[in-house]
């Protein structure tokens, strides 16, 4: 199978939340890592390649520093990489990110596209589904099991309350992978050396700009919650306290 893996570079989970001057995102001077759900998507793609043969291609969109997650993927066993390289890619919302990816792979005949369920920074869980719509392919989300069949793939989806769904889907298709579907591998020393020799195609913003539209979403302002501690004692009999509590929740906190 020829598999495309969409991966993203995100701020490390323990990175300090220092906002930029505009208050629209965190500052650039933080440490970055591969998005965890995408790491599981890559691992599953590599396992499918080991079972059935084929090629694993990784793609990301972002500034020059994003190349690091591609190098890590190549070191783990991916065959080649595609980098949509420009700072402006980082400002795209999910729809335009999907459009940019679709434009970058135009002409390539992939059997399967896999992404992480969602990103650890924005958490929209939209890019994979939107990419499927743009490509005109079937898709499935929250995948925790993939089995290749003669007619396509047999999938296991995680539902609520410990329930699962099993579905059969033809190829080509787009899947969003749930974290924990497998056990992640480490890059070997020889893999790290080989990664330097593997091809990486760079795609400029201008090459895909015609496929993009105005962002439908944008971040107006971010803020770090202020820690507060306030205790208010309600006095009276139990019925009186209950009545005061309900009034407080309805009129002051406005949660009911």
Image (cartoon, grey):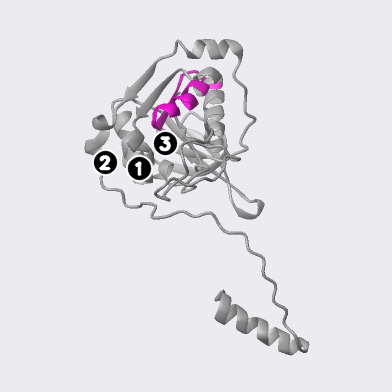
The disc label shown at residue 212, or none? 2
Q: Which callout, 2 or 3, points at the residue further toward the start of the chain?
A: 3
Kindly identify the residue that appears in the image at 21 percent across and 37 percent down. 210
Percent x, y for residue 92? Answer: 35, 42
Q: Is residue 17 above or below residue 83?
A: below
- From the viewer's perspective, is residue 84 above or below residue 21? above
The range drawn in magenta is 51-72
- On residue 92, the disc is 1
Alpha carbon separation for disc pair 2 and 3: 22 Å
Q: Are marks 2 and 1 in contact (CB under 8 Å)?
A: yes
Q: Where, quadrant-wise, is the N terminus in this rendering?
A: top left
Disc 1 to disc 3, C-alpha distance: 24 Å
| Residue in the image at 28% along x and 26% along y | 107
Front label number (1 vs 3): 1
Rendered residue at 24%/38% (across/down): 211
* 10 Å crowding of disc 1: few (<14), some (14-19), many (20+): many
Classify 199 as above or below 45: above
Secondary structure type for disc 2:
loop
Q: Residue at x 65, y 55 (%)?
A: 161
The outermost residue toward the left is 210
Residue 182 in view: yes
Residue 191 in the image: state x and y as whole percent.
56, 13
């Amino acid at each position: 199978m020829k598999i495309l893996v969409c991966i993203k570079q995100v701020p490390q989970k323990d990175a300090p939340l220092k906002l930029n001057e505009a208050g629209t995102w965190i500052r650039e001077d933080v440490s970055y890592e591969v998005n965890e759900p995408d790491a599981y998507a890559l691992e599953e793609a590599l396992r499918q390649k080991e079972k059935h043969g084929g090629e694993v291609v990784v793609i990301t969109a972002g500034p020059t520093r994003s190349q690091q997650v591609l190098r890590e993927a190549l070191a783990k066993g991916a065959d080649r990489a595609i980098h949509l390289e420009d700072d402006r890619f980082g400002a795209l919302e999910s729809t335009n990110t999907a459009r940019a990816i679709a434009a970058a792979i135009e002409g390539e005949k992939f059997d399967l596209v896999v992404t992480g369920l969602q990103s650890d920074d924005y958490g929209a869980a939209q890019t994979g589904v939107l990419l499927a719509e743009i490509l005109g392919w079937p898709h499935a989300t929250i995948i925790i099991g993939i089995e290749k069949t003669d007619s396509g793939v047999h999938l296991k989806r995680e539902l609520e309350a410990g329930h699962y769904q099993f579905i059969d889907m033809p190829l080509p298709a787009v899947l969003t992978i749930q974290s924990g579907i497998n056990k992640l591998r480490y890059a070997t020393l020889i893999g790290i050396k080989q990664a330097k020799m593997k091809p990486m195609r760079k795609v400029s913003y201008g090459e895909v700009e015609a496929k993009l539209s105005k962002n439908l979403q944008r971040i107006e302002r971010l803020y770090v919650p202020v820690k507060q501690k306030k205790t208010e004692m309600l006095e009276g009999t139990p019925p009186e306290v209950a009545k005061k509590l309900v009034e407080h929740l309805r009129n002051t906190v406005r949660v009911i």
